[in-house]
Amino acid sequence: MNFRISSATIALAFGAAFFLTACDAPPPPPPKTYPVKGKVVFIGGGSPSGGSVDFRSTTDMVTAVGKVEADGTFVLQTLSSREKVNGAVEGEHTVTYTPGQGQDQSTLLPVTAAEKYRVKAEENNITVTVAKPRPPQ
């Protein structure tokens, strides 16, 4: 028997091998994060009772999220490569509070804090101040 392999067949075989190798590549390691806990407060007083808070890094494409508890407190986690790691990346962040899904909050819009907040390379305890959420107009 005489087998002939064309250059297109060889290229296809190398392409398939490259694709399968790339699919098996391990995900990148999670970013370096630092512990962040805190409390959300409203301008003029009071705290939300539920919802979530998002810290979006202004320099990296990384977001840390935290569930806002009944007393307004939160603890952040960063989702990276399909795993959650405690804390947030160091640096400046834009912070948004999203109201919970209760009867009195389900139609309220998210509120972004007027100032940016800095996560330091240490344990962080941050008080986030936002306007009270309002219903859509």
Image: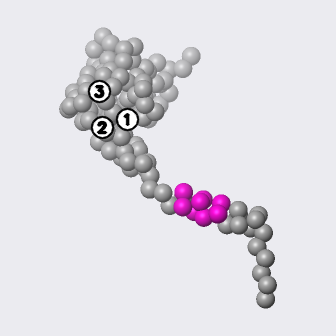
Which residue position is annotated with label 3?
A: 119
- Along the horizontal axis of the image, is 135 left or right of 76? right
Q: Nearer the viewer, residue 116 or 121?
A: 121
| Tag in front: 2 or 1 | 2
First in sequence: mark 1 vs mark 3: 1
Amino acid type of the residue that numbered disc 2 sits on in the rendered structure: Thr
Q: Position of residue 69 (x, y in %)?
A: 29, 34
Which residue position is annotated with label 2?
A: 33
Q: Position of residue 60 (x, y in %)?
A: 43, 31
Residue 15: say if magenta. Answer: yes
Q: Quadrant of residue 121?
A: top left
Q: Position of residue 97 (x, y in %)?
A: 40, 26
Q: Which residue range is magenta in the image?
A: 14-22
Look at the numbered discs 2 and 1 and tell me whether their residues touch, using CB distance below 8 Å.
yes
Instruction: For mark 2, give the secondary structure.
Output: loop
The image shows residue 14, relative to residue 31, as above or below, that is: below
- Along the horizontal axis of the image, is 59 left or right of 33? right
Which residue position is annotated with label 1?
A: 64
Separation of marks 2 and 3 at Cα, in angstroms: 9 Å
Q: Quadrant of residue 52?
A: top left
Q: Dominant secondary structure of the magenta stretch?
A: helix
Q: Nearer the viewer, residue 21 or 116?
A: 21
Instruction: For mark 1, give the secondary structure.
Output: strand
Residue at point 32% right, 13% down? 43
